[in-house]
Image (cartoon, coloured by chain):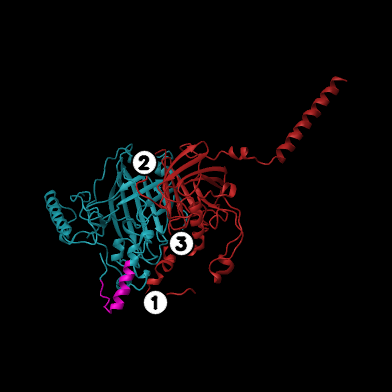
């Protein structure tokens, strides 16, 4: 965008007062909603004049990624329906906590911040049914192969990227709220934006220029470049490994491929709120692109060092168990957790 | 002497002294004092701009002290993985170990392949992350100086002008930063005792305190000075010093060496169903 055009659009943005407070309702077209314009003056700026996205942001939410089956067809709830649904969720949580678990229960953000169900019923804004699109046959085959490998446990590579502490959990890319460590640190200079995740200590470096990525190099977090579109930072990421992204969601779907193209948008809404959106396209994995939007809240929390691989006792345990089962002559009918 | 003659002598004298001054300026080598007066370009908030991709060019990761060349631990790797000779980066070339600690350093060196956390792709700690043979990137803002390392996807953030209190023991430390004129000073504590300073077995305890000083000495080089304090292991503080050089590729890009997958056989190989052998 030329400086002239950007300046003209910035003039239009002045005086616009629409502020988002939750996931958007789905339009008839199923397209993701347009980025919010911000009230000029509520967005702090850096010394370089950019919107200031710096800080530690918490993106925990009770809103699930995909629309729950019992809410099928409902793009938003009435206030009474929202209260009733929240009561249902609380009852289920109570039941879950009464059962023995592999985890102590304190690990998870079990009481996640409330979401506005009158504005949406899933973090997915597109497709309109609020569900991850149908996987391709290749993705289904990959998922089946991964499940079989996990059950065999013949070596570390039979486990997921997160289990191996290579790439993990809610921080993707892309960022998807999970049940723990929903926290990310953003740092910016004039020429670089950094998405610094806690799990697993990944400083995703985004040069703010239009350099094309090298054609034949792949990285677990892909290779990113970014640009400012008005007050929104747009980050494009490609060059992912052909092995699959390690986030929990993607494990359930068999991971992604080196054809994955991710577009993320970061918009500082006000002093305490940042809007995050992404559209993910991977023709090898899903039959169509899909998009997500949610908000992050500024927090005083620091991010911890998460030395996952250095303390990965689980890997030893899983492999020892697999060898013990083979010795005992048991079948390998072990189910993949989560 | 005529007036004209005196002017001529004056002109010749001035010209001569100018020539002498020029000769002196051209032949003077830069002293430490001149090096220290380099003034880096500023960021928008008026601080020396240390943004960029940097790398050390030395053999400190092999051994931070002076060392002769010697055979590496895997004979089949031959010259590709043996130790080249190198000058050390320790000021005075002496590491003031306590006697018991010196014995532990030797034991570390003897079992290097088994004990060095680098072999396992463990987080490298500070200051080793700085002088490993891989680049790192500085992204600098008024409130944060972030270091992103290629090796092991390691990272750390120095929080500017705040006193950072460690809440847990870490591999990469808790860092507070401040500016002293042209120098970025970073104080780090909150280390565990698991990282090493090099492949020669030099180590520390969890009482480690590290003070680093980054000073631009030209557009494309920094002077890096480190003070190590650890009363459990050493009898006094000691220093390392080395230049760091800017990557000048256009554009320069930091690629991450996420090496966990290459360490898995070293760590879990004995638990495989079918043992793997090296090629």
Earlier-in-chain disc, 1 versus 3? 3
Q: Is residue A189 visible?
A: no
Q: Which region is colored magenta?
A: A317-334
Q: Distance between the residues labelled 1 and 3?
A: 25 Å
**CB within 8 Å, label 1 to label 3:** no
| Mark number, residue A10 | 2
Give the distance between the C-alpha atoms of the residues marked 1 and 2, in whole angstroms: 63 Å
**Which numbered circle lies on residue A334?**
none
Left or right of residue A118: residue A297:
right
Q: Where is residue B151 in the image (x, y as percent from the top left)?
A: 47, 57
Question: Which callout, 3 or 2, points to the residue nearer the camera?
Answer: 3
Instruction: Identify the chain drawn in cyan.
Output: A
Residue lying at 84% horizontally and 20% vertically, measured from the top left: B3
Label 1 marks which chain's residue? B
- Chief secondary structure of the magenta portion: helix
The answer to whether A84 appears left or right of A200 in the picture is left
For the residue pair A275 and A252, the one nearer the viewer reads as A252
Q: Can residue A112 be seen in this view?
A: yes
The chain letter for the residue carrying disc 2 is A
Name the residue that disc number 1 marks. B274
Q: Any magenta on residue B255? A: no
Colour for chain B in the figure: red
Whole-percent x and y of residue B113?
A: 48, 64
Give above or below for A39 relative to B73: above
Q: Mark 3 points at which residue?
A: B115
């Amino acid at each position: 965008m030329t400086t002239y055009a950007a300046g003209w659009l910035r003039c239009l943005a002045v005086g616009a007062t629409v502020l988002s407070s939750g996931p958007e309702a789905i339009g008839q077209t199923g397209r993701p909603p347009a980025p919010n314009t911000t009230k000029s003056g509520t967005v702090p700026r850096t010394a370089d004049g950019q919107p200031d996205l710096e800080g530690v942001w918490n993106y925990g939410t009770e809103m699930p990624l995909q629309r729950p089956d019992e809410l099928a067809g409902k793009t938003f709830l009435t206030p009474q329906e929202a209260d009733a649904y929240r009561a249902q969720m609380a009852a289920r949580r109570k039941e879950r906590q009464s059962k023995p678990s592999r985890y102590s229960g304190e690990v998870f953000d079990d009481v996640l911040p409330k979401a506005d169900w009158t504005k949406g019923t899933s973090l997915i804004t597109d497709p309109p049914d609020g569900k991850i699109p149908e996987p391709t046959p290749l993705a289904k085959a990959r998922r089946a192969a991964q499940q079989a490998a996990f059950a065999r446990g013949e070596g570390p590579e039979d486990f997921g990227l997160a289990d191996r502490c290579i790439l993990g959990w809610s921080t993707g890319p892309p960022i998807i709220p999970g049940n723990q460590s929903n926290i990310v640190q953003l740092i910016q200079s004039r020429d670089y934006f950094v998405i610094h995740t806690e799990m697993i200590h990944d400083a995703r470096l985004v040069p703010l220029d239009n350099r094309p990525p090298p054609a034949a190099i792949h990285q677990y977090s892909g290779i990113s470049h970014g640009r400012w579109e008005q007050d929104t930072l747009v980050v494009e990421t490609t060059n992912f490994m052909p092995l699959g992204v390690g986030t929990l969601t993607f494990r359930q779907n068999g991971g992604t491929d080196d054809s994955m193209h991710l577009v993320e948008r970061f918009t500082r809404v006000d002093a305490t709120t940042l809007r995050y959106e992404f559209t993910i396209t991977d023709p090898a994995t899903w039959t169509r692109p899909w998009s997500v939007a949610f908000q992050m809240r500024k927090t005083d929390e620091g991010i911890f060092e998460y030395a996952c691989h250095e303390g990965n006792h689980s890997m030893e345990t899983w492999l020892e168990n697999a060898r013990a089962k083979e010795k005992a002559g048991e079948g390998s009918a072990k189910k993949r957790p989560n | 002497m005529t007036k004209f003659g005196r002017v001529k002598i004056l002109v010749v004298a001035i010209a001569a002294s100018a020539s002498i001054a020029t000769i002196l300026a051209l032949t003077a080598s830069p002293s430490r004092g001149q090096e220290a007066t380099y003034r880096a370009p500023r960021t928008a908030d008026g601080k020396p701009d240390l943004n960029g991709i940097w790398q050390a060019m030395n053999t400190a990761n092999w051994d931070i002290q002076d060392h002769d060349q010697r055979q590496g631990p895997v004979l089949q790797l031959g010259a590709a993985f043996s130790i080249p000779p190198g000058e050390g980066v320790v000021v005075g070339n002496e590491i003031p170990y306590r006697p018991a600690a010196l014995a532990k350093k030797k034991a570390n060196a003897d079992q290097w392949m088994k004990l060095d956390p680098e072999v396992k792709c463990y987080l490298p700690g500070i200051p080793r992350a700085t002088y490993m043979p891989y680049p790192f990137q500085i992204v600098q803002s008024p409130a944060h100086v972030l270091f992103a390392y290629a090796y092991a996807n390691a990272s750390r953030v120095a929080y500017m002008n705040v006193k950072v209190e460690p809440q847990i023991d870490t591999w990469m430390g808790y860092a507070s930063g401040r500016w002293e004129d042209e120098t970025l000073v970073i104080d780090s504590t909150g280390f565990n005792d698991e990282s090493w300073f090099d492949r020669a077995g030099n180590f520390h305890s969890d009482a480690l305190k590290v003070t680093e000083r980054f000073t631009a000495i030209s557009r494309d080089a920094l002077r890096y000075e480190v003070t190590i304090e650890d009363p459990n292991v050493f009898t006094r503080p000691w220093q390392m010093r080395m230049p760091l050089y800017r990557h000048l590729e256009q554009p320069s890009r930091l690629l991450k060496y996420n090496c966990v997958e290459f360490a898995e056989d070293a760590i879990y190989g004995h638990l495989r169903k079918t043992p793997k052998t090296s090629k």
